[in-house]
Image (cartoon, rainbow, N blue to C red):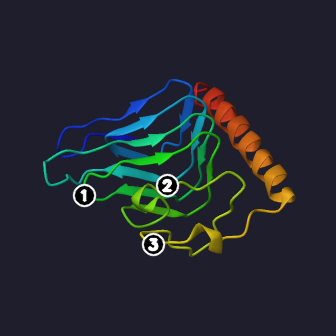
Amino acid sequence: MLRKNPSVHYSQVSEKVFIDPTAILCGNTIVEDKIFVGSDALIRTDEVDEAGSIQPILIERDSNIQDGVVIHSKAGAAVAIGERISVAHRLIVHWPGVIDGLNIPIPDSFHVPPMTNIGPGFDLNTIAKAPPEYSSFSESVLSANHALGEGYKRKSNEF
């Protein structure tokens, strides 16, 4: 479901995505091509910064937001989920303060373990690089969710 936030921002969503009917995108969100948004996901921008502005949550192409994920922009802050990223089931991305704290980019080949809070002062060197088998697993997850999105889009037209 797409809905406006209290500041009357509305999501910009490519036609080349699948958003589960139970998912909610609220406010200033931008969803690029070939995205899968799973059931009960919530992507929400509704809080303003000190100037009354709200920056977008951007989901870049070929990524997937799996079941139960929450992405919330606090105090109008921008959030970006890069290309070909899998945001795993029930993960919470709450900015500022978690995952993308103060624009700390997560380099390629990193796997952020569960319950890791990445925020101001976090040393990325404390996270081990993902072993090679994680890359092949990640690619399989991306492919599977892309195929699921295409399949669900086809089925949604069959009534």
Q: Earlier in the sequence, mark 1 or mark 3?
A: 1
* Closer to the eye: label 1 or 3: 3
Query: 5 or 49, which is in the foreground?
Result: 49
Looking at the image, residue 54 lies above or below residue 119: above
Looking at the image, residue 119 lies above or below residue 133: below
The amino acid at mark 1 is Ala
Q: Could you say which quadrant of the image residue 67 lies in?
A: bottom right
Q: CA distance from mark 1 to mark 3?
A: 20 Å
The amino acid at mark 3 is Gly
Residue 85 image offset from top left, x and y in percent:
62, 47
Q: Quadrant of the C terminus?
A: top right
Q: Is residue 53 left or right of residue 141?
A: left
Q: Earlier in the sequence, mark 2 or mark 3?
A: 2
Label 3: few (<14), some or many (≥20) within 10 Å? few
Q: How many marks?
A: 3
* Residue topped by disc 1: 75
Q: Quadrant of the N terminus?
A: top left
Q: What residue is shown at x 62% (from left), y 58% (from top)?
A: 88
Query: Could you say whether the residue bearing mark 1 is in a helix, strand or loop?
Result: loop
* Closer to the eye: label 2 or 3: 3
Looking at the image, residue 11 lies above or below residue 137: above
Q: Which mark is residue 121?
A: 3
* Residue topped by disc 2: 40
Q: Could you say which quadrant of the image residue 61 lies in?
A: top right
The amino acid at mark 2 is Asp
Tell which residue pokes out farthest to the right in this image. Answer: 133
Residue 137 image offset from top left, x and y in percent:
81, 53
Q: CA distance from mark 2 to mark 3?
A: 32 Å
